[in-house]
Amino acid sequence: MHRLTFIVLFIWGIAPLASGAERPNILFIFCDDHATQAISAYGGPLAGLAPTPNIDRIAKEGMLFRKCYVTNSICGPSRAVVLTGKYSHLNGFRNNRDTFDGSQQTVPKLLGAEGYQTAIVGKWHLKSEPTGFDHFEVLKGQGQYYNPRLNSNGKMVSHEGYTTDIITDQSLNWLEQRDPEKPFFLMSQHKAPHGKWEPAFRHFEFLEGVEVPEPPTLFDDYSGRSKAASLHEMGIADHMGEGRLMLEYSSKFTPEQFARFDGFFRPKNEAFLASGLEGKDRTRWHYQRYIKNYLRCVKAVDESVGRLLGYLDDNGLTENTIVIYSSDQGFYLGEHGWFDKRWMYEESFRTPLLVRWPGVVAEGTVNETDLVSNLDFAPTFLEAVSAEIPEDLQGASLVPVFKGKTPEDWRTSHYYHYYESGGHGVPLHFGVTDGRYKLIRFPEKEIDEWELFDVQADPLELESRYGDPALEAIQKGLKAELDRLRRQYELPEGELE
Ligand code: CA
């Protein structure tokens, strides 16, 4: 062997392994249904009442994204997109009735091949057992807020306590027992703040006696849009049911826990039931009950983030660990009178994204304009560890964006496709946004309508401008872009109109 060739091989083949300890760790903290409206770093009317100082720390020491949009605003499908870097029609998980095909290429498998230790702890929600992780410890289905059972590498283990805390404990346990010589990739994924919102005992008093401000669209009448929104079954007024209102409890409590939980809620429930509240007053009570319990659940998540960041600090890991905070999608906190997700309207289309990477991401930066997506997470993880990005991934690495060097050819439009027709009354729809204008298509024959919003002029999305002559060129351009994206992303022929 020629000496130079040998040296090149040595540098190319051995040097990366020799510097393995320098490759960054990745801590991916992923919540379920956590709206940006409930993260104080994003501002808004809830920020002062319900601050999230630990999540905010990630923004303070890193970058916050205002335009991170999902491809399909619902739990399982979003998780499948994160794992594969592919749209639902290619990863095979279009709606929550599907089962994830764990034999396909995923991020943990690709990172494992790079010498990373990989683990997932908490919410999984993809039906099939996790594959490709060195360690998994996941809730079955949605799991419950108290006393979760975790599938720990194939064995069901019962835990007693509050699930958000237990997911944190188990994440820390895994970090503690890992091989410190190898870099890690940990997905710490909460059930919270997914409904039904059962807070930790220590947060019962949080927001008690406080009147949380109502969103301006709590009593939306859905005029000015297609009929789709009016078909919803996610109304705070009519669809919360006893479980979401905490008139009934979901968790299987121990007798002691039940006494404590019931002791807090029962007197208030009895007073409500005796009050005979009707109409808007009743909706207002529902909203207060909902939003307080939601924010209490968020508070436990924020504390969890604090514990994880504290562990990194205490163990000299802060400098070389990328911390990413996100959620599987956004959520309605009373906007449009709703409590769920699914729609391409901003509150559920948008998801939080906060990233800390010391030395790479400038502290305290806010990315206001770049259209980024959960589709980008997989290629980002790979580029961050200097791994090759397989060509079949459909997203783009955010690493240059993190560095403040967004490529010239960064996407200027984003494609969305929701499949779970009928869930909470939301019809199948797809659409495109350019960051300001948003075109939505409801193709099912009972609706068969389009909507067009100018999110800048109409941030609450109350008036569809579809068919407005003043926006004719915009509408035409977005239709062409929608068609182009559907072909680019390889929508099956049958799903192309
Ligand atoms: Ca979710």
Image (spheres, rainbow, N blue to C red):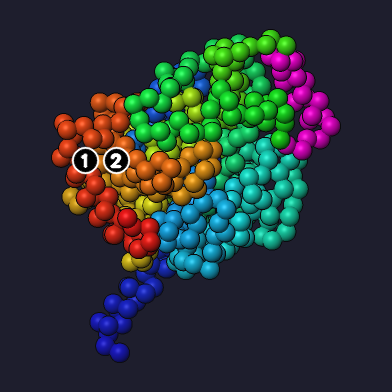
C-beta proximity under 8 Å, tags 1 and 2 = yes
The answer to whether 227 is drawn above or below residue 491 in the figure is: above
Q: Residues within 10 Å of mark 1 (few under 14, many from 20)?
A: many
**Amino acid type of disc 1?**
Gln
Q: Earlier in the sequence, mark 1 or mark 2?
A: 2
Q: Main secondary structure of the magenta part?
A: helix
Secondary structure type for disc 1: helix
Where is 292 relative to 229, above or below? above
- Mark number displayed over residue 475: 1
Looking at the picture, tell me which residue is in the foreground, 252 or 388: 252
Residue drawn at the location 52% of the way across and 46% of the way down: 75
Is 23 placed left or right of 196 in the picture?
left
Pinpoint residue 90: horizontal percent, then vertical percent.
Answer: 42, 62
Whether residue 50 is visible here, answered yes or no, is: yes
Mark 2 residue crowding within 10 angstroms, few (<14) / some (14–19) / many (20+) = many
> What's the amino acid at mark 2?
Leu
Q: Which mark is residue 439?
A: 2
The image quadrant where one finds the N terminus is bottom left
Residue 305 seen in render: no
- For mark 2, give the secondary structure: strand
- Please state which of residues 204 and 399 is positioned toward the viewer in this rendering: 204
